[in-house]
Image: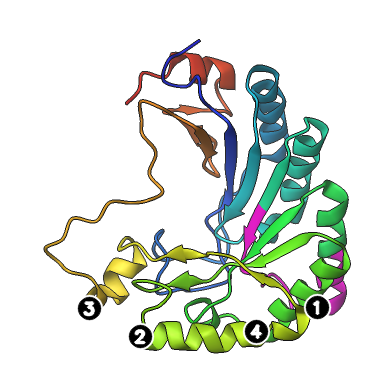
Amino acid sequence: MNKYTENINRIEFVITYACTGRCKHCSEGEHLTTGEHIDGNKAVEMIKKVCENFEIKTLMTFGGEPLLHIEEVCNIHRAATEMNIPKRQIITNGFFSKDETKIRETAEKLAQSGANEILLSVDAFHQETIPLEPVKAFAEAVKNEGIHLKLSPAWLLSERDKNPYNIKTNEILKEFEHLNIEIGEGNIIFPQGNARKYLKEYFDPDEVYVNPYEEDPQDIRTLSVDPNGDVLGGNIYRTDIMDIINNYKGE
């Protein structure tokens, strides 16, 4: 067993970097509405091999906007369900269509795939460019399908800070009160990508900020796969995932 990867217990797939939003806080920077997406068949193959060798507790799909590629998302969560991964999460901004029929059908497909928690990104940043009504319709459809749903806002500086963005976020969250949806911790915006560009006045230019989501390269817990198949310095489209894991050098 590779000492750098022996504690792997989580799998993440960035389905695509394409997105329906243009958020000022996005750590990935500017997004297009189209672009490369994960190969669902290769992802399923990887899930099965990893689960044969590790006890995986969580699988997550996100983006960009993952629901632009619903079939790939469903294939991945179906495989995670088959391999008995307990927590099967999706992060989405909830805006992939304005068609109410498609919104309901998408929620139904997600439920059938075995996805059991959806983190819905709603806040002042997302709602600058994403209409609220289709997102609310998606939230209601997800609830009707029995999938656990949490609102997952992005907070600037801290949840308690009274800056204009946080004030607006709290107003937006009230729009969901009638649905009785749990509000999760969300996340604190990190000065990277668009946030560094558009929100720089909120951050100290002399302070060294540590990315809270960055892993220790010598104690990998999460396999995070990019849309092009890259993971741990290898690529699942070209190399068996177990070879990638076993040959990882802790860098």
To which residue does mark 1 refer? 99
**Among numbered discs 1 and 3, the one appearing first in the sequence:** 1
- The answer to whether 219 is drawn above or below residue 205 in the figure is above
The local crowd at label 1, few if under 14, some if 14 to 19, many if 20 or more residues have their Cα within 10 Å, is few
Nearer the camera: disc 2 or disc 4: 2
Q: Which mark is residue 163?
A: 2
Give the spatial CA distance, label 1 vs label 3. 38 Å
| Residue 210 point in image, percent of width and height | 27, 51
Q: Which mark is residue 201?
A: 3
Nearer the camera: disc 1 or disc 4: 4
| Residue 226 point in image, percent of width and height | 52, 42
The local crowd at label 3, few if under 14, some if 14 to 19, many if 20 or more residues have their Cα within 10 Å, is few
Q: Residue reaching furthest top?
A: 1
Q: Which residues are magenta?
A: 90-105
To which residue does mark 4 refer? 132
Q: Secondary structure at mark 2?
A: loop
Give the spatial CA distance, label 2 vs label 4. 21 Å
Occupied quadrant, residue 102: bottom right
Residue 98 belongs to the span the image colors magenta: yes
- The answer to whether 90 is drawn above or below residue 196 in the figure is above
